[in-house]
Image (tube, rainbow, N blue to C red):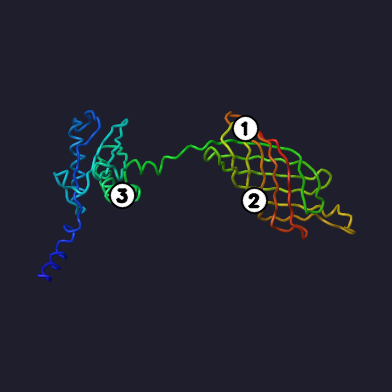
Amino acid sequence: MKTLTLFLAFLFPLTLLADSFFIGPVSGEIANISNDQGTTSGKEIKSTYRALIKNTLESQGETVTQNKKGADWELSPSILKLGNSFIMSLLKKKNGKVVFAEKLKATTLTDADVVTDRLVLAVVNEEAASKGQTVDKVTQAETRGTSVKTKAQKQFFFGFGPGAQTAIKGAGQGFYYTLGYLWGLDHQVSLRLNLEGVSAKDTEARMFIVGIGTNYYFNRKKHAPYVLGMLTYGSATADIKNDPTCTFWCSNVSESGFGLSAGGGMHFYRTSSVNFAVEASYNQGFYEVASENPGSYGVKIKILW
C-alpha cells in the first residue's frame, strides 16, 4: 500500500500540488472593434480573455473550478480600451480580499495571448509581470519601448571670461573661452561636449581642452545651480623661450594628455529657448609639460540657444 501511494504521488505530482482557481467574470466596458477581418464584439473580446486565462492556468498544471467557495484562489480579470490599446488587469483574491494585482498593455488584440500568459504567471507567482518577459513573450508595447526614446533637448553654447594657467612656464592671467553642445537627458541631468581654451595675456603659454561629461542641476526651477564633471583631453604649451633662465636659444614645449575638469555654476531662464549661465571650472592635466602638470581655471558667462 505504501509503495502504491508513492507511485501515485510520483505519477501525478502536478495534480497533488496544483492550486484550484475560480475565474470571475471579466469587467470593463469594451465597444465593438472593426477591422479588415470584420467586427469583433466587446462580449466576444471578454469571453476570449477569460478563455485565455483558463488555458494558461491549465497549461501550468493548475486546476480551474466552477465552484467559487471550494477554490483556493479567485481571479478577477478586467479589460479597458484606451485609444487603440487595451489595458488588461488581473486580481488574485483570497476570501474576497485582494492579495496581488498586475496589469499589462496590449497594443492590439493579437497581443492578447502574450499579455494574458504574462499576467497569469505573474499573478500566480505573485511577482511583477516584467520578470516574466522571455524572448517568446515580448509585447508589441515593450518592443516599441526599446526603439522610441525621449527626445533630448539640445543647446549650443558659447562662453568667455577671465582665466589663467597653473603649473606651467609662462603661466598667467588671460582670456578663457568655451563652446560646445548640451543635451538635456532629463530635467536635472545634461550631457555636455565642449572645447575650451585659455591663453596668457603677456606670454605664449596656452592650453586647449576637449571635454565630455555631465551637468547635474540641484532643482527643476527656472534658475538652477549645478555642478559639472568632465573627462578631458588637452594640449598645453609652456613659454620656454621667454623664460629668464633660458641663456641661449630656446623653443616652446608642447605636450598633450588626459585630465579632469570640475566646477559649478548658475543656469538662468532654463525654461526659455535662449538662456545664459555663469560658470567657474578648473581643469587638471595628468601629463607633464617641462616637468610640470599643467592646469587651468576660469570664470565664464555662457550663452545657450
Mark 1: amino acid: His
Q: In percent of the image, x 68 and y 39: which residue is there?
A: 279
Q: Which residue is mark 2?
A: 232
Q: In percent of the image, x 70 and y 35: which residue is there?
A: 301
Mark 2: amino acid: Thr
Would you place residue 235 above or below residue 104 in this image?
A: below
The one of 148 and 92 positioned closer to us in this rendering: 92
Query: Which image quadrant: the N terminus?
Result: bottom left
The label on residue 271 is none
Q: Which residue is mark 3?
A: 126
Label 3 CA crowd tier, 10 Å (few <14, some 14–19, many 20+): some
The kind of secondary structure element at disc 1 is: loop
Q: In the shown orientation, is residue 290 left or right of residue 123?
A: right
Q: Which residue is mark 1?
A: 223
Mark nearer the viewer, 2 or 3: 3
Q: Residue furthest left?
A: 1
Question: Could you say where residue 300 lies in the image, as x and y percent from the top left?
Answer: 71, 38
Label 2 and label 3: CA atoms lie apart by 48 Å
Label 3 and label 1: CA atoms lie apart by 45 Å
Would you place residue 212 above or below residue 288 in this image?
A: above
